[in-house]
Amino acid sequence: MNARVKQREATQASILQAALKAFSEEGFEGASTREIAAMAGVHHGLIKYHFKSKDLLWRAAVTFLFERQAQELALPDPADPQYADPRVYARAMIRERARYWARHPEHARLMAQESCRDSERSRWMVEEYNRRAAKVGERFVRYLQDHDLAPANASVPSLVYIIMGASQLFFTLSPEVQRIWGVDPTDPKAVEDHIATLTEFLIR
């Protein structure tokens, strides 16, 4: 890889990281490409050069989120002998996902910003990424139901969102948690305390 290609990729990565922060905190409408360029430390014109438009930059940021999730989130395999006890597998599944949300609260924040709207961007995100992610959640919930770890007659979508919300919200609302409770959800001990409470509460 030559120096020019490396520089191009580094510039794109800097812009995407800044875009994630801006879009997750301010939403699509609230974030500006000038603000994103300033955060990335690049000339404003480079955003148009690399991503063509604000809409395409937003889509590239969402794609980056899910590609990063696929790389970082190695979900446990229920067929692995160490997970012969369904409770051990269920707790491991919740633990790994919660640790990902703790590392990247901007993921859930960006999803929430757009998922509250029935926009063209939201529909694109659902079809490209969220529908597949929901299937993972559905398989997990049905596993819990099949092993008597969740009510067999409960709504599957409700359980998916209950588990997802419980795993994410502590980290997604980090500023509020700090103001009200004096707890920093980014502190490693707070992360592990939350996960221990979460797994004990959901999988007894």
Image (cartoon, rainbow, N blue to C red):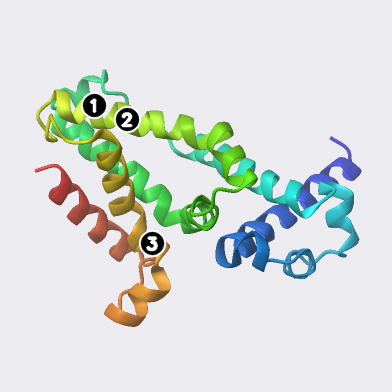
Which numbered circle lies on residue 142? 1
Foreground mark, 1 or 3, reads 1
Foreground mark, 3 or 2, reads 2
Q: Residue furthest front?
A: 118
Q: Is residue 197 above or below residue 59?
A: below
Residue 122: name its quadrant.
Answer: top right
Q: Residue at x 32, y 30 (%)?
A: 138
Q: Closer to the N terminus: mark 1 or mark 3? A: 1
> Callout 2 environment at 10 Å: few (<14), some (14 to 19), or many (20+)?
some
**Type of residue at label 2?**
Glu
> In front here: 74 or 32?
32
Q: Quadrant of the N terminus?
A: top right
**Type of residue at label 1?**
Arg
Q: CA distance from mark 1 to mark 2?
A: 6 Å
Q: Residue at x 68, y 45 (%)?
A: 59
Q: Closer to the N terminus: mark 3 or mark 2? A: 2
Residue 65 location (% of width, % of height) = 57, 45
Relative to residue 120, is residue 78 drawn left or right? Answer: left
Q: Is residue 190 above or below residue 157?
A: below
Q: Residue at x 30, y 37 (%)?
A: 157
Relative to residue 183, is residue 38 drawn left or right? Answer: right
Residue bearing the label numbered 3: 171
- Circles 1 and 2 in contact, beta carbons < 8 Å: yes
> In front here: 86 or 162?
162
> In front here: 97 or 56?
56
> Callout 3 environment at 10 Å: few (<14), some (14 to 19), or many (20+)?
many
Q: CA distance from mark 3 to mark 2?
A: 23 Å
Which numbered circle lies on residue 138? 2
**Dot 3: element:** helix
**Dot 2: element:** helix
